[in-house]
């Protein structure tokens, strides 16, 4: 695989080169910069920078030996500080990737590991930084061969991964493994056309109510059974509420009645208009309903496609063509980008002819993230890779 996103410490990557997020002056910053200097040999690398490199403009890159690192080279990308997105930050960030890759090519480097440049202490939004990284790496690989890793490693990402992993494994077991076992059991023992929940013992008809079963057994000649002698299903019938003594009826006071009326009015006042609004969108296409949900959640379109890490051109096609159907993975990514809950996700996907399958691990991982309100496409993509599934971003 020429391009892969991994969770690791970039100083421990076994590649010919690693990329560092450098300052423009010969000083050592925090985060990735500090970690690289410490691992390579702080004084040795800093002295080399002062003597051989000096000042370098934002968006440019330079190369040094790796010193004590496993990597033979360090390519230092002078990372832009993020202000508001209108100060040329994107152009400079793209230049960091382009010039780093060009330096690697010039030095016949076959494998290289990048951090997510500028998204730490330099303040660049993570999802937007990821989109730019993916754009530039893909563009380079169209014309060149190189093994490229994008390394995601910080305290937030690592902590999130450690928290997600055990819960996600349990979620997959409950939803995917159980479904597969039931499917296999049903096919082997009862035939695929008979779901397990409709299989009954030979004594009872498949969908016969428990009361009727009890009567039929009694009519066959058995004496009237006690509750202990009755089948388990019949005991619940014997102890059901229709055989219990009625409780005394409490008549609510005037004050309680007034409170109930007020609560009913409050519910209608709060939800009736929202329900009517939803009803008006019953026949919306995927595109129309997505735009409605984005507006209802007070989101900007750019926030959605950036957080979903999809191309702006694809989002524009969806927005401007009411009948445009994206592929399923794009549709799922936009559900994450819009911060939808599970019901909204299912509803939106259905309008494009898709559904979340309990027999598809990719669908289950998306379901887990959405159900737990973890709207992080980078972490989701890493989990797909760690479960041996095709990645979306890379």
Image (spheres, rainbow, N blue to C red):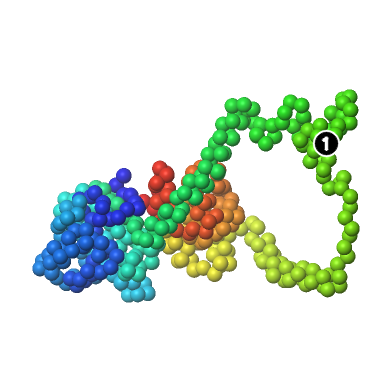
Instruction: Tell me which residue sits at (25%, 69%) in the image.
Output: 29
Nearer the observer, 15 or 338:
15
Q: Position of residue 155 (x, y in %)?
A: 37, 61
Q: Nearer the viewer, residue 301 or 52?
A: 52
**Position in image of residue 230 (x %, y %):** 81, 33
394 sits left or right of 58 in the view: right
Residue placed at 58% from the left, 34% from the top? Answer: 183
- Going by the picture, which residue comes out furthest to the top? 221
Residue underneath mark 1: 227
Q: Is residue 76 above or below residue 234?
A: below
Q: Using the image, determine if residue 388 lies above or below residue 134.
A: above
The 10 Å Cα crowd at callout 1, few under 14, some 14 to 19, many 20 or more, is some
Is residue 182 positioned above or below 288 on the image? Answer: above
Pick the residue in front: 201 or 18: 201
Q: Secondary structure at mark 1?
A: loop
Q: Identify the residue at horizontal 87%, vertical 29% (top origin).
A: 218
Instruction: Estimate the x, y position of residue 102 in percent, counting from the top left.
Output: 20, 57
Rendered view: 10 above or below 86? above
Drawn side of residue 306 relative to residue 197, left or right: left
| Residue found 40% across the figure and 42% down from its top | 388
**324 left or right of 37 in image:** right
- Which quadrant of the rendered structure holds the N terminus? top left
Q: Is residue 269 visible?
A: yes
């Amino acid at each position: 695989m020429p391009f892969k996103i991994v969770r690791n410490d970039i100083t421990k990557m076994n590649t010919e080169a690693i990329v560092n997020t450098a300052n423009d002056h010969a000083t050592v910053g925090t985060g990735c910069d500090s970690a690289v200097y410490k691992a390579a040999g702080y004084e040795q690398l800093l002295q080399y920078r002062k003597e051989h490199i000096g000042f370098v403009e934002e968006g440019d890159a330079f190369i040094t030996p790796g010193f004590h690192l496993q990597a033979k080279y360090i390519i230092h990308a002078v990372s832009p500080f993020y202000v508001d997105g209108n100060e040329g930050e994107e152009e400079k960030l793209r230049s960091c990737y382009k010039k780093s890759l060009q330096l690697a090519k010039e030095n016949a480097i076959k494998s290289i590991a990048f951090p997510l440049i500028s998204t730490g202490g330099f303040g660049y939004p993570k999802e937007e930084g990821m989109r730019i990284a993916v754009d530039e790496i893909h563009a380079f690989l169209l014309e060149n061969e190189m093994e490229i890793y994008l390394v995601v490693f910080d305290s937030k990402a690592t902590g999130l991964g450690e928290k997600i992993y055990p819960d996600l494994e349990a979620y997959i077991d409950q939803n995917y493994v159980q479904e597969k076992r039931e499917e296999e059991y049903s096919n082997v023992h009862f035939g695929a056309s008979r779901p397990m929940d409709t299989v009954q013992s030979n004594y009872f008809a498949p969908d016969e109510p428990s009361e009727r079963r009890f009567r039929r057994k009694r009519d066959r000649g058995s004496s009237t059974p006690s509750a202990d002698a009755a089948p388990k299903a019949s005991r619940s019938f014997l102890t059901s509420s229709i055989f219990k003594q009625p409780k005394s009826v409490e008549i609510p006071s005037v004050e309680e009645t007034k409170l109930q009326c007020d609560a009913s009015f409050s519910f209608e006042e709060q939800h009736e208009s929202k329900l009517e609004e939803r009803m008006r969108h019953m026949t919306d296409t995927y595109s129309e309903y997505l735009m409605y949900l984005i507006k209802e959640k007070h989101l900007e379109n750019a926030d959605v496609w950036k957080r979903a890490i999809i191309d702006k051109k694809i989002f524009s096609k969806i927005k401007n063509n009411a009948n445009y159907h994206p592929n399923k993975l794009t549709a799922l990514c936009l559900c994450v980008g819009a911060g939808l809950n599970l019901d909204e996700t299912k509803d939106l996907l259905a309008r494009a002819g898709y559904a979340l399958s309990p027999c598809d691990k990719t669908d289950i991982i998306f379901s887990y993230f959405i159900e737990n309100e973890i709207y992080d496409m980078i972490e989701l993509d890493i989990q797909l890779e760690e479960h041996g599934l095709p990645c979306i971003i890379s």
